[in-house]
Image: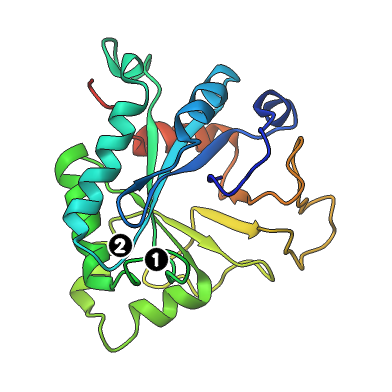
Amino acid sequence: MSHYDLTRPDFVGMANQGIVGIIHEATYPRLQRDARYDERQRAALDAGLLWGAYHFGDATNPIRQADHFLNTIESARPSLWKGGSEERRPGVLLVLDFEKNGHYPGGTMSVAHAVAFVERIKERTGKYPGLYCSEYRLRQMLYGASATSTHRRKLLNCWLWIANYHAEPRNTAPWSSWHLWQYTGDGKCDLRPRSLYPKSIANVRKAERNIFRGDNIALQTFWRENAWYPSG
């Protein structure tokens, strides 16, 4: 979700319909903060949902982008991060949105900048973020002229969140498989039957819905192990 979703989300309804977690935009170019992040984080956690945050990358300084992203998350609800063990504190699953930037200032993030971004996240948090990309763009960028085997090896430390609204992703190299698959967004989805691939949830008609590779127990474990637990 992001500030582009104008509806006030019914997170309780989502939880009742089987949604386990929300990944929301926290920051975007140039060094902007999503105005809906704080209030939706609070509402989602109150509804018992897991929480994640993503940064939409651009072509500017990747270290500065990573720091802005983490600082935004830390300041969102600082009382959440103080005291207690990781098991008792809500973690934040971190993601770099590695899309083509056609509607924000700052240009499109390069593969080299993506590597610098994720390494900075690892340096500050001890965790690599997930990498979000469409299946077509993933192959185009990571096997294009500007990408090297070193770039691919470093990005392989990230878990993969891949988008394909037409079929289950197959071209996931250098990853052996995806972790999260976004199968619909903005009302686009060619998969059938619709009962298995719904495009809405609760009061959100054109939702960006995802499938995790594994059962609910595996998802809970994955989220806990890959989330960042700010210390406050």
Q: Which image quadrant: the N terminus?
A: top right
Q: Amino acid at mark 1?
A: Trp
Query: Looking at the image, which residue sits at the far bottom?
Result: 145
Viewer-nearest residue: 183 or 36: 36
Query: Residue 112 at what x, y percent from top left?
Result: 21, 71
Q: Earlier in the sequence, mark 2 or mark 1?
A: 2
**Protein image colouring:** rainbow
User: Mark 2 touching mark 1, by CB under 8 A?
Assistant: yes
Inspect the image, locate mark 2, and give the three-letter code of the amino acid beneath it.
Leu
Q: Dot 2 surroundings within 10 Å: few (below 14), some, or many (20 or more)?
A: some
Foreground of the two, 224 or 202:
202
- CA distance for labels 2 and 1: 6 Å
Q: Is residue 135 above or below residue 119?
A: below
Which residue is at a point 16% across and 40% down the rendered structure image?
A: 124
Residue under the point 38% across and 14% down: 88
Residue appearing at x 19%, y 61% in the figure = 61
**Which residue is under mark 1?**
175
| Near-viewer residue (157 or 138) | 138
Q: Secondary structure at mark 2?
A: loop
Q: Is residue 162 left or right of residue 96?
A: right
Instruction: Estimate the x, y position of residue 171 in percent, counting from the top left.
Output: 50, 75
The residue wearing badge 2 is: 156
| Quadrant of the rendering where the C terminus is positioned | top left
Q: Residue at x 46, y 76 (%)?
A: 137
Q: Residue furthest left?
A: 123
Element at label 1:
loop
